[in-house]
Structures are given as structure tokens and as C-alpha cells.
Amino acid sequence: MLGQNEKAPEFSLHAQDFNPVSLSDFKGRKNVVLLFYPADWSPVCGDEIAVFSAMKSIFDKEDAVLLGISVDSRFCHKAYTDAHQVRFPLLADFHPKAAVAQSYGVYNEQTGYCKRALFLIDKEGIINWAYLSPDEINPGADGVLDALGKLNGSNS
Amino acid sequence: MSVQLKPEVGGQDHTRGNKKAQLEIVEYGDFQCPACGDAEPLLEEMMDQFNAVLSLTFRNFPLKDAHEFAYGAALAAEAAGKQGKYWEMHDLLFSNQDRLDELHLISLAEKIGLDTAVFEQDLRSRDTVEKIEADFESGARSGVNGTPTFFVNGTRFDGGAADLYQIIKENATID
């Protein structure tokens, strides 16, 4: 798994609205929080997505965008977000399968899903903070908000 | 690393039970969340049984994207609190989880004898909204990862109400 001070690998993936989203879209403009999670529709992930979605205004305030990434296809993300209000893009790391998760070192070869991990990437595209959570535990946002606060503090 | 409650329980909170409790429990909850509703009878039983050693604080963590009426219900509880009836409303909301639209909120307010004109005003007041936002942000910064999330003496407890009850049964000493 990649860690602090490493360059965040570039990606371009489709979101639930079928538009492509690239890491470089935010370069020089926004901090990026990547939220890798195993799957749409699974119980812990559903909670994690709902909780982070509800926190979107806090991330807005901290000058950060949230991007969810799983190996589900864009059609699956669309069905999921049609059924559940989600205020941030869910990206499809579907083809070639889990290429982005692999580049960040958070693909679980055994299960075929992404691990549950958070990355904070600064505006220069450098990983500022990273965290791997056990699959069955939604990590919560305390760690990433802490790191964001420090990152924003050091830049101001 | 354990996850810590920020800020600690204080005057801004709604707390019942023994204020100088040996075990200080904080629940981040959502009035429309079925899991919070399921936890409620267990929490009540726990409070009855271990009243001498427990306190229970409720903080708002409405998942408004998942639960349409959660935010309004949180406002109703805070508005009732302004008339000194926070817990009466809290309990009623959980026992009426499937009817939390505004008309029903007002009928619940009537039921517990609130001045409904004042109640309706407080539902829309800025400081009621700010209390909920502050609760929510404190939850986000404390690592709340779903509802309900419990903290015991300031540390996140990774389990549900039944697990919590079990631990308390095993550890609480009653004189």
C-alpha cells in the first residue's frame, strides 16, 4: 500500500453519471480524499458511504473532494446511487479490473474486492496520509479530518 | 489506536442518569435509523438496571441522505429540550419512528404538553440547527462510523447496544 509522501498514481475512471473523473482534474485546486471500499450494496460499505455522504459539507469546508472507488461497474454505481442518495462520485475500477486499486496497493487478490482504505492527496498530487481499515470496520472520518486540518494549517 | 470522543460530555449535551457516573456512555444516533430504534429498549433496560453507575448522553448524527425525516426529528428533540422536555420527545420519537413527518412531530409536541407555537418556532430557529450541526461535526471528528455509534468513557466502542449491555453487566459493580 502506498503511503505518505509518495506520488499518487493518476487515474481516470467513470462515475455513476458515466462521466470520467481523473485525479489530475483536481491538481492545484482541491485536496482529494480517496475512499476505497469493497462493494456497493454490502452492509458495512452502505454505512460508510451514507456516513461520508452526510459529511460532505465538512469536507467542502476543508477544501477537499471525496471520491469513492470500488470494482463495481458504472451501471452498478448508477443503480446504487439511484436507490441511495450519495453526494460524491463513486468511481468504477472495473476494467481492467481493479487497476487503480492495484496501483495504490489496496486490492485484495483473494476476494477480488478493494480493501477498505482512505488516502488523502494534497493539491500537488502527493499522498499526505493513508489508512487501511479492517474489511468489517467502517473507518470513520476522524483520522482523515485530522490530517486535512493539519494539511490546511500548514498551507495557510 | 483507539478513537476518542471530541469534545467530552459537557453542558451543551443532553445527559440522563448519574452525572458523576462510573461509566459515561455517549450515543451518536439518528431518530429514523432502525438500528437506533432497536437499541433503545436495551438502553432503557440498561439505564434502569445500572442507574447508579451509568450516564447516557445522546448526540445527533442524522444521516439525512439515508433517512428523510431524521433531521426534522432531531430538530424536534432539540426544540422540546428548550421547553425542558428533551427526553420525553427523544423517547416518543423512537417509539414513533415510522411517523416522523412535521405534522406528526407537532402532534407529539402536543402529547407531551409543549407550547406548540413556540415549538414550531424553535423547529426553525438557528441555534437548534447549529446544535445539530455541532453534534454532527463532533461525531465526524470523533470517528462515528454509523448509527448508533457508542463511546464509553470517551473511547469509541466498536459494537452495538447488546454488546454494550453485556460488557456493562460483566463490569459494573453495584454497591
Image (cartoon, rainbow, N blue to C red):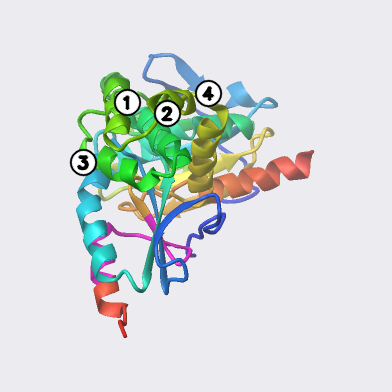
Could you tell me the amino acid type at mark 4? Answer: Ser
Element marked by disc 3? helix
**Marks 1 and 4 share the same chain:** no
Q: Nearer the viewer, residue A122 or B116?
A: B116
Asked if disc 4 and disc 2 are in contact, CB closer than 8 Å, the reply is no
Could you tell me the amino acid type at mark 3? Answer: Ser
Q: Which residue is mark 3?
A: B95
Indicate the chain on which mark 1 is placed: B
Q: Which residue is mark 4?
A: A22
Marks 1 and 4, how far apart at CA: 48 Å
Marks 1 and 3, how far apart at CA: 15 Å
Q: Mark 2 vs mark 1: which is more N-terminal?
A: 1
Marker disc for residue B106:
1
Marks 3 and 2, how far apart at CA: 20 Å
Marks 4 and 2, how far apart at CA: 48 Å
Magenta-span inclusion, residue B113 = no
Taking the image as shown, residue A51 lies to the left or right of residue B135, namely: left
